[in-house]
Image (tube, grey):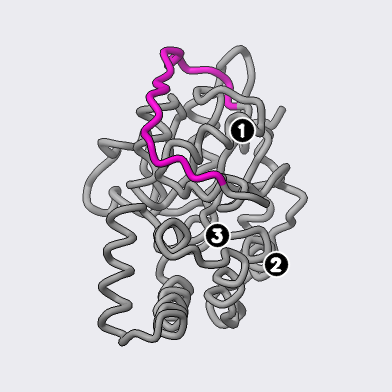
Amino acid sequence: MACGVIQGVIRERSHAMRMVDPKYLVFDLDETLYPTSNGLMEAIRERIILYMMGRFGISREKAEERRTTYLARYGLTLAGLYIEDHVDVKDYMAFVHHVPLGQYVRPNEALDRMLARLSPAKVIFTNSDVAHSRRVLSALGVSESHFELIFDFEAMGCNAKPHPESYRRLLERIGAKGPECILIEDNPRNVGPARELFGMKTVLVGKGRSEGLVRSELADWVIDDLLELEGLIAREYAGTQGRTFGRDGAT
């Protein structure tokens, strides 16, 4: 798939901010569907450094410096590598995700059951790729059938979250408006554009409440554990147009 990188900023703030039934639950993948503490992303980050050392023939220190620069500039190491160094996206993805997932990701039957009960359509919105997403779902014991779509880095046109173009392309692909979607995400940096530019409702997972925060400046809701999502949706949307969602009665 060809990637069309758009480096300008899109100004597409929705004015339809009223509470409407969620048509889509938009899930990030890594460190959202599984806990940050399991160590998988640390293993992937190590593979990223090894990739850069081998690709460019540079030291670990130089690779770390370049990675930090790309993260600050683009929000994702791969975005910088693609834009500035023209790396092959598929080769990169295959290398950095070549880790033994079973050592890090454990089956989560409760998550699989919750996703089955949640009635809005569900999609995965990830800066990784479809192959990695499927491996993570398999390791979790979560059926891919819960999700209508896995929308990955290449589907974004290689415009990684938090670039506004990635959100615009997702909404265009699923045929939804921002306020009709709830984004569930672990990275505060990726929550801001969804809410501020596109009017999505946002849930920040695993950040904030343990520090005494109920709401984030960027997110509409903050939860410690993804399994809290069902109760949150049932509570916040109960009675909206006479419908309920999740544990209080799926529609």
In this rendering, position of residue 214 left or right of residue 231: left
Circles 1 and 3 in contact, beta carbons < 8 Å? no
Establish if 117 lies above or below 91: above
Query: How far across and how far down the image is residue 86, in percent?
Result: 49, 63
Question: In terms of depth relative to the viewer, which is nearer, 113 or 173?
Answer: 173
If you read the primary sequence from the N terminus, does the residue marked by circle 1 or circle 2 appear first? Answer: 1
24 within the magenta span:
no
Query: How far across and how far down the image is residue 78, in percent?
Result: 45, 62
Identify the residue position indicated by label 3 in the image.
128
- Specify the segment rendered in magenta: 4-22
Question: In terms of depth relative to the viewer, which is nearer, 214 or 51?
Answer: 51
| Residue pictured at 41% horizontal, 50% vertical | 205
Location of residue 65 by image quarter: bottom left
If you read the primary sequence from the N terminus, does the residue marked by circle 3 or circle 2 appear first? Answer: 3
Question: In terms of depth relative to the viewer, which is nearer, 113 or 202?
Answer: 202
If you read the primary sequence from the N terminus, does the residue marked by circle 1 or circle 3 appear first? Answer: 1
Query: How far across and how far down the image is residue 68, in percent?
Result: 28, 66
| Residue pictured at 44% horizontal, 26% vertical | 198
Instruction: In the rendered structure, find residue 24 and report the number of the disc placed on it.
Output: 1
Nearer to us of marks 3 and 2 is 3
SS for dot 3:
loop
Secondary structure mostly seen in the magenta stretch: loop
Location of residue 222 by image quarter: top left
SS for dot 2:
helix
In this rendering, position of residue 89 left or right of residue 59: right
Establish if 213 lies above or below 90: above
Q: Amino acid at mark 2?
A: Ser
Q: Residues within 10 Å of mark 3 (few under 14, many from 20)?
A: many
Identify the residue position indicated by label 2 in the image.
138
